[in-house]
Amino acid sequence: MLTKKGLRALGAEAVGTFLLLATVVGSGIMGEQLSPGNAAVALLGNSIATGAILYVLISYLGPVSGAHFNPAVTLVFCLRRELPLAQGAAYIAIQVLFAVLGAMAAHAMFDMDLIQSSLHQRSGGGQWLGEVIATFSLLITILGAVRFRPLEVAPMVAMVIVAGYWFTSSTSFANPAVTLARSFTNTFSGIRPDDVAGFVLAQLAGALLAALVAHWLWSDEKPLAQ
């Protein structure tokens, strides 16, 4: 049975994942509408908005749930035994559900069909490698920040995501729930349903690699005094 604290944590994951996806999809739509045919401008707006909302969401929801908003993050914290498996499973279910609802909300704001099937092809070795590196970068940043710079988790995560939009071939999805939700939008941020599995497998590989590297790097290091 969930405690009041547990329910609040699930609520925080729901709110955070919903607003994250509304921002990712909504800013992509806005960028596309304001700069037709100019993908660089649309990506710039998309990346800035995503980094900004992550900074805000992590700042006020982190104390409640840890501000995962991402099954890959939740999986790593479960493997590190810092989150009970049952709570982790509940987190992931909430993240997936509210990611899809967030994408639908973005469509509703722009008077589009609520559920769409993306035609945006994102596949191939280069893009899969991009997702491995993007997710590795995100998770190693989170694990290092939580251990050594806990007061700086929000800005560090925001910055690594904005950077990932630009330096990875995949534009840094780095999140299985985000990936699934973006398959339901045929807009700038979308991904074909057929391409979701490859991205998710790459994300899980990147997350597990980050967990292993973090353990190797820091298992004997004491957290720095704040």
Image (tube, grey):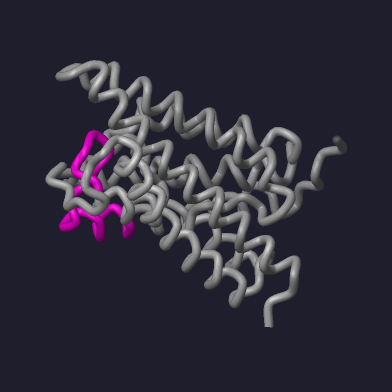
Residue 169 to residue 208: above or below? above
Residue farthest right in this picture:
225
Q: Residue 188 magenta-drawn?
A: yes
Of 158 and 90, nearer the camera is 90
Residue 162 to residue 176: above or below? above
Q: Position of residue 192 (x, y in %)?
A: 17, 50
Q: Residue at the location (41% across, 32% down)?
A: 164
Q: Give the range drawn in magenta.
A: 185-201
Q: Residue at the location (71% across, 54% down)?
A: 64
In the rendered image, which quarter contains the C terminus?
A: top right
In the rendered image, which quarter contains the N terminus?
A: bottom right
Q: Residue at the location (29% across, 44% down)?
A: 129
Q: Where is residue 154 in the image (x, y as percent from the top left)?
A: 64, 36
Q: Residue 152 magenta-drawn?
A: no
Would residue 212 be visible to someone looking at this image?
Answer: no
Residue 44 to residue 103: above or below? above
